[in-house]
Amino acid sequence: MIVVGAGPAGAAAAIRAKQLRPRARVLLTDKADFPRDKACGDGIAAHGRDELALLGVPGLIDDHRPVRRLAVVSPGGARVAATVARPNHVVPRMVFDARLVAAARAQGVEVRRHRVRELAAQSGRVLLDGRLDAGTVVAADGANSVVRRLIGVPPTPARHTAIAVRGYADVPADDDTQFIAMQRDGWPAYAWSFPVGDGTANVGFGMMLPRLHATGRPGREVLHGRLAELLPHLPARNLRAHHLPLSPGRPRPGAGRVLLAGDAAGLVNPLTGEGIYYALLSGRLAGEAAVEAAANPLAAYRRKLAQALGRHLRTTDLLSRAAQSPGFIDAAIATAARRKEVFDLLVEVGLGAGTVPAPLALAVARRWLWNGLRRR
């Protein structure tokens, strides 16, 4: 098996394949050496830690302080702040990704720097650049996946693509609250501050790509300016931009003997932009499919993804359509401020694999309708 891209999805695929078949030959490639920075919100939710445990590295981030509280301000000013049911972590990708690659090496995975340029299918094998071949290739090479393009899978359309800018800022050493400030102008749009636990926080601002283009202004000017506007007390440094291919309800998992995982598969939560949990999960499932179903890994991978994320992805797709109205989010946050079970559910849907029971959906719908009538 060859894995292209050594971020969380790729490393998870490689580790899982070696776990299940220790004598298998697994090559993990990336165009960069590690450690390397990656523009991201750095948030690792409890579901992501569950995946680390399944990969045999449950203590990978134990030296990073858990973040136990989450505060959200909606586009219309509704506020909620509460302790999450299970704490999250914030670990810079410079650290997290390098540790996962080291864990893969420790499992016996060969790690090599290599940039893929060509791909060909040959009698039950996949040939990369005329010299690397395998029965299965896992493409985990990110939002701008070269492998996805080579197998003819179209990229995520612009209407489902977000763009964000990320940096770091100084915060009090005891800050233990992940903060999200939503903005009505250009909605969906929000800024965040996620404390790392060392006196710094990952801060950033993101919005949908078409909304950015509609401003008619340079992207840097808009993204940097809105971040400063929403978090004026947290001047950011080391700002970098990145695209987020937001997941549709039924993402395409690959073609032939190539499996797409993580951002390459468009697996990014359309409500929150969270992608690390999806990356770890999809990478693990791709690794499993590659060794358990060598004759037809794509069919096995498709089934595994549907079982693990099918209902959840359909839920987030539906909610993301409703969330095009900022009033819907105002209602959801207002309801969460009054009912802890709604707050917990929103966290599960936004950071994990949760779905929405009908009674709670009805409660939010009632609040949405009531808010609309009041404004009239």
Image (tube, helix red, strand yellow):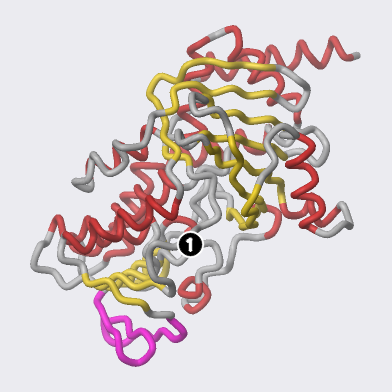
Looking at the picture, how far across and down is residue 146, in whole percent? 50, 74
Looking at the rendered structure, the secondary structure element under dot 1 is helix
In this picture, is 307 found above or below 154? above
User: Can residue 371 be spotted in the picture?
Assistant: yes
Image quadrant assignment for residue 241: bottom right
Identify the residue shown where x is 41% and y is 64%: 140
Q: Is residue 177 left or right of residue 112?
A: right
Identify the residue shown where x is 75% and y is 15%: 369
Q: Is residue 165 left or right of residue 16?
A: right
Between 283 and 88, the one lying in front of the other is 88
Q: Residue furthest bottom?
A: 130
Looking at the picture, how far across and down is residue 235, in whole percent? 70, 41
Q: Is residue 282 left or right of residue 106?
A: right
Q: Which residue is mark 1?
A: 264
In this picture, is 84 found above or below 161? above
Q: Is residue 133 magenta?
A: yes
Q: Residue furthest top?
A: 338
Identify the residue shown where x is 31% and y is 59%: 11
Looking at the picture, how far across and down is residue 363, in whole percent? 61, 12
- Specify the amino acid type for callout 1: Ala
Identify the residue shown where x is 24% and y is 64%: 290
Q: Is residue 69 magenta?
A: no
Q: Quadrant of the C terminus?
A: top right
Image quadrant assignment for residue 258: bottom left
Between 68 and 236, the one lying in front of the other is 236
Q: Is residue 15 left or right of residue 235?
A: left
Decide: few, some or many residues near mark 1? Use Cα within 10 Å; few <14, some 14-19, many ≥20. Answer: many
Residue range corresponding to the magenta coloring: 116-135
Looking at the picture, how far across and down is residue 175, in whole percent? 52, 25
In this picture, is 183 found above or below 273? above
In this picture, is 163 found above or below 63? below
